[in-house]
Image: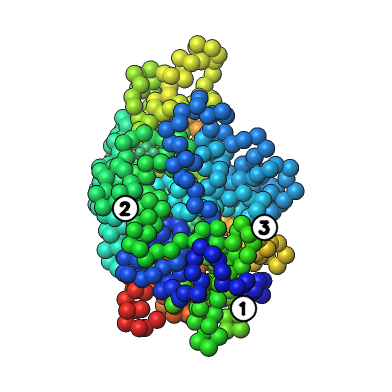
Amino acid sequence: MSVFFSPDKPDAGDIDLTRIYDAIVVGSGAAGGMAAHVLTSHGMKVLLLEAGKKLNINKELKSMEWPYDHPRRGAIPPGSHALSLNEYNIRPRPYAKGTSYNHVYSYVERGTGADYSKNIVVDEKDHPYTGTPYAWVRARCLGGKTNIWGRLALRLSDYDFKAKSRDGYGDDWPISYKDIEPYYDKVDLYLGISGHKEYLPYLPDSIFQRAVRLTKSEMMLRESLAKMGRVLTPYRAGVTTDGLKHNKYRSRCYGRGACQRRTGGCDIHAAFDSPTGLIYPALDTGNLTIRTNATAYEVTVDKETGKARGVAFIDTETGKNYEARAKAVVVAASTLESARLLLLSKSASHPNGMGNSSGHVGHNFCEHLMGPSVTGLVKDLVGKPRTIDDGRPGNFYVPRFRNLADRNPNFIRAYGFEGSSGNTMFPAGVYSAPGFGSAYKKRVRDYAGAYIEMGGFGEVLARYENYVDLDPGVKDKWGIPVLQFHYKFGDNEKKMAADMADAAKDMFEQAGIEVVSVDREMLTEGWSIHELGTARMGSDPKTSVLNQFQQSHDVKNLLVVDGCSHVNASCQNPTWTIMALAWRSCDHLADQMRKGEV
Ligand SMILES: Cc1cc2nc3c(=O)[nH]c(=O)nc-3n(C[C@H](O)[C@H](O)[C@H](O)COP(=O)(O)OP(=O)(O)OC[C@H]3O[C@@H](n4cnc5c(N)ncnc54)[C@H](O)[C@@H]3O)c2cc1C
Ligand code: SF4
């Protein structure tokens, strides 16, 4: 049993803890929601443990509330504070230690409309972490970060899965694109994705619903990039633009653009979120039990077999400890929290933490670097009548173009750009426009629709030396040891960032877009909110934690189905891949359990 807690008697009240479930799923975000959906669809009885609350998300998001209907035009209340870039780089960790604010949030709560997501994200005061600077954005509530995610839904290809075979660095994944392709298709069809086919081998197309419309300036850039052999494609949004007949909890996107004006979120659930997309349909099978306010702090072990016996958790409201039991445990608490849970789960048979005989849990931690960006002006659009460009759930994406057929002399791997343009409710350039009074207003109106900008997302190499472990001294509000970061960008990332800024500028110039500004600085580690790799999959149990079905090499009835398992970060946003892999692994688990192999 735990070195930290000993569970109280099994009387959690609202759920039956005397029962042995077929599976316990820890976490209810993209990964946990998918696990619950797939396992219950196989008829398995599943208990879902979620650390956060079940919020009335529609009441939280109020997507159509106008800024003037909010007492602070959407800003978080006085006495609350969201961390800035400088604070991340300079303040000692834990970031909220010694603060006089009532609540401290991550940087995502700095934007306009952040008040609508303040109950979705964590208060840094309750959830500290230590070590090297890191902007760690977490959501604790049913659905996790999917309630506010940015929705860019991309596939990986064999340029990613077999990257080592191409450039010699790191490791190949134990799967190829053909293994995961049917599952990407299932995710597309079940959840809905909007986009436009481009037939690129390095960014495979999905089964798309209606694409978002490109603006004039985006079309201009698309045409110019085509001459350079590059592509600009409408944002591939994890949003149903044509509707989903099989899901009564979601509506099709009717282009309110509200998800763009705030930290995120869509109260009609056109944008995918795990509760309406996966968990409520799973509940309808009658096979799912959900326990919220239940923070897992240990995967417990059967002393006889060394296999997982269940999960010990603490009720975050009462502080009471419980153990739930199951034939299989599926960890899906997000890349860093799942690593923390495995490391916390020390026992005589797993002295290094559960599934960690390789010593690789917490290591090979990778993500995407952000920062370099360009802003430009399409002069021909200045002073033109306003167009309605705001009603889009996303704008545009420029896929990778480096290290495809050629080899860049300075860095390996690649980056892509996310960008936006056009008229929006809050006009672009409003802060930098010169002038005063009516002249200023005219200037803002004339220029608003003429701006275009894009920022890079680049692959951070997976390195054993970049890792998290448990801090020996610091605990969270519930007495659970916290993570300590040992994580830094390296030389490859710095060189890639320099190239991102140069390439972005060059692409605008070649398209005849006047460059207004170029940002060359890298944002603090963690900014992309795409943490990956802390329990990677592989064929060799000495150098990897999971097999190709995200099943622990050491503990057959333990799966870790979130971004932990990624062997490298690639440069594409990870959520669609997380869900496709989770679907594949849970199908495999159900099959093994049917055959009595687990
Ligand atoms: C503002 C924002 C924009 C984003 N944009 C994009 C994008 O455009 N494209 C993209 O691909 N990705 C994007 N992401 C990232 C995306 O949200 C994540 O990749 C995805 O949610 C990961 O799913 P997950 O299930 O691993 O983690 P989460 O969604 O974070 O879910 C994990 C869940 O586990 C729970 N949990 C944690 N610890 C425990 C514990 N010990 N016990 C029980 N439960 C626990 C948490 O409360 C949470 O509900 C964005 C994220 C944010 C915040
Ligand atoms: S634009 Fe679409 S996805 Fe975004 S909030 Fe509106 S309906 Fe939802």
Name the secondary structure under disc 2.
Answer: helix
Rendered location of residue 495, percent (x, y): 51, 52
Q: Please give the name of the residue rendered at 72% of the width and 65% of the height, measured from the top-left corner.
A: 473
Among numbered discs 3 and 1, the one appearing first in the sequence:
1
- Return the residue at label 1: 1
Q: CA distance from mark 2 to mark 3?
A: 36 Å
- Closer-to-camera residue (112/455): 112
**Going by the image, does 172 lie left or right of 49?**
left
Residue 477, labelled with which disc? 3
Of badges 2 and 3, the one in the foreground is: 3
Q: Quadrant of the N terminus?
A: bottom right
Rendered location of residue 560, percent (x, y): 46, 69
Rendered location of residue 190, percent (x, y): 29, 55
Q: CA distance from mark 3 to mark 1?
A: 21 Å
Label 2, residues with CA under 10 Å away: few <14, some 14-19, many ≥20? many
Q: CA distance from mark 2 to mark 1?
A: 40 Å
